[in-house]
Amino acid sequence: MIKTRLKTLIDHCFDQGVEAGFWSAAAAGGYSLDEPKHAGQGDLATNLAMVVLAPHTDLLERVEVAGPGFVNCYLNKTVWQSVLPEVCANEATFGRSDIGKAKKVLVEFVSANPTGPLSVGHGRQAVLGDAIAGLLSATGHQVTREYYYNDAGRQMRVLGESTRARYLEALGLPFTFPEDGYQGQYIRDIAQALIEEHGDGLKDEPEVTPFKNKAERVIFDDINTTLHRLGIVFDNYYNEHSLYENGLVDDVVASLREKGLAYDQDGAVWFKGTECGLPQDRVIIKSTGEPTYRLPDMAYHREKFKRGFDWMVDIFGSDHIATVPDVLAGVKALGYDPSKVTVVLHQFVTLLRDGQQVKMSTRKANFVTVDELLDEVGADVARFFFLMRKADSQLEFDLDLATKTSQENPVYYVQYAHARLHSIRRQAEAKGVVLGSLADAPVGRLTLDDEILLLKAMAGFPGLVQGAALDLAPHRLVFFLQDLAGQFHSYYNKHRIVSEDEELSRARLWLAMGLRIVLRNGLALIGVSAPESM
């Protein structure tokens, strides 16, 4: 009776598989349920998995039972060989998909206030955000890149006071430099530009506004120039100050009060965070009347929802880790779904030279700027290195390695693989060997284990792109490119692409074409060039 019950269960599973299209009904009655021959192999055993999979010789070479609950499937080489025509036929679109289904996604990143040049920490965030946006676009999402900044508040006032002090200093007049003012050479440059425009006409100016406005314009132009050097263009800039001008911050406070989630105490306004999952209530307006960071951020995120985005991705430095729960609690309190907001926190960047930390800029500020880094290593290297670690891992940027123009440099290692693949076709044509038609490509000649491994890697590329996009993990693409380049270099050093066997040569030329396409497409997704010669 027990055996009958189990057989009934297995039959039911078999029928479900037939209904789902996993296998045909031809195997009905072809599997058994018996007592095993040896102790320790269960009370009863069935060969169902072997029977239903065995007929699929077009896909499977063989199947093996491997431990409890597992069946190892060995695919026919023809399955992997069939990948190559697909890669070569799709060319630039291979790896792309529409799984995003035009879902509207806002990716906010950089968002540095215009108080100075971008630091290397901002550089990591810029590249990370741009790569995430690129991956989401490649998987069918409708992506908007947004830069959120504040041109008002205390930081900007101090910027203006710093510029005024340097202006007066340059004129040889008495000045008082703010205690926590901005010290970089860029402030002196802006002050000198004011002298060239106005002479000493601003020496008695009581307001800080003209100094602040000039500094803001110059610095924002500088930031945009830096971002363009990295190949980054934003679709929209959102000014925090507009949230105040349009009454949106006040409206958030009013909404929270209506819901009983804001109250007054000790002259301050508090958000009742304890009713929204926070361990304690939070001040949103200080007793001085100045809002804390939480309040405008809540208003800004509410506006993101109102603009109709389905998914909002925030790229922040790890110093924001304490602020994220407060803002998301505010989003929930205002009636929106915080699960539609994903925050990616990245760790800091340490620059190393000769194994020692590079601590200070020599030209512009008390930190190393992105421009200085780009002057030394270039955009391709900077972008690649910034993505070589997971976002939540601290990044040690080795300048000695980054400035090498050999295959020791991981960027050149991958780019050289692409350039070598590109040169192979030229060399073959010089010897009279041409690719021929894709329809007649003799891919069946690609039977070596090394060749199958390369084909498997290419086959996995679209899935890798999808996973990296949905998990907001562009570092996976960098890992993949390094591994694929390594596999190719190893294959190339062991096997001749062009030989006396013309058919085999053509097959390997098509393999080289497919690898070149995948490397080029992968590099493009992270904004790195794919040179044809090096």
Image (spheres, grey):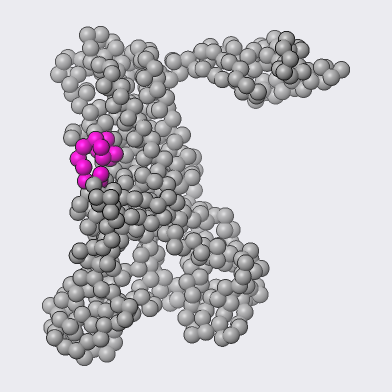
| Residue 403 spot, x, y in % from top left | 21, 46
Q: How many marks?
A: 0
| Residue 520 spot, x, y in % from top left | 30, 35
At horizontal 45% and vertical 76% (from top left) the residue drawn is: 244
Task: Look at the image and say whether residue 409 sits in the magenta stretch.
Answer: yes
On screen, residue 347 above or below 431: below
At horizontal 47% and vertical 15% (from top left) the residue drawn is: 76
Residue 481 visible to the viewer: yes
Find residue 476 and report its image quarter. Answer: top left
On screen, residue 108 above or below 56: below
Find residue 195 and report its image quarter. Answer: bottom left
Question: What residue range appears in magenta?
Answer: 401-413
At horizontal 23% and vertical 15% (from top left) the residue drawn is: 498
Query: Which of 411 and 426 lies nearest the eye of the viewer?
Result: 411
**Quarter of the rendering occupied by the C terminus:** top left
Task: Look at the image and say whether residue 181 sits in the magenta stretch.
Answer: no
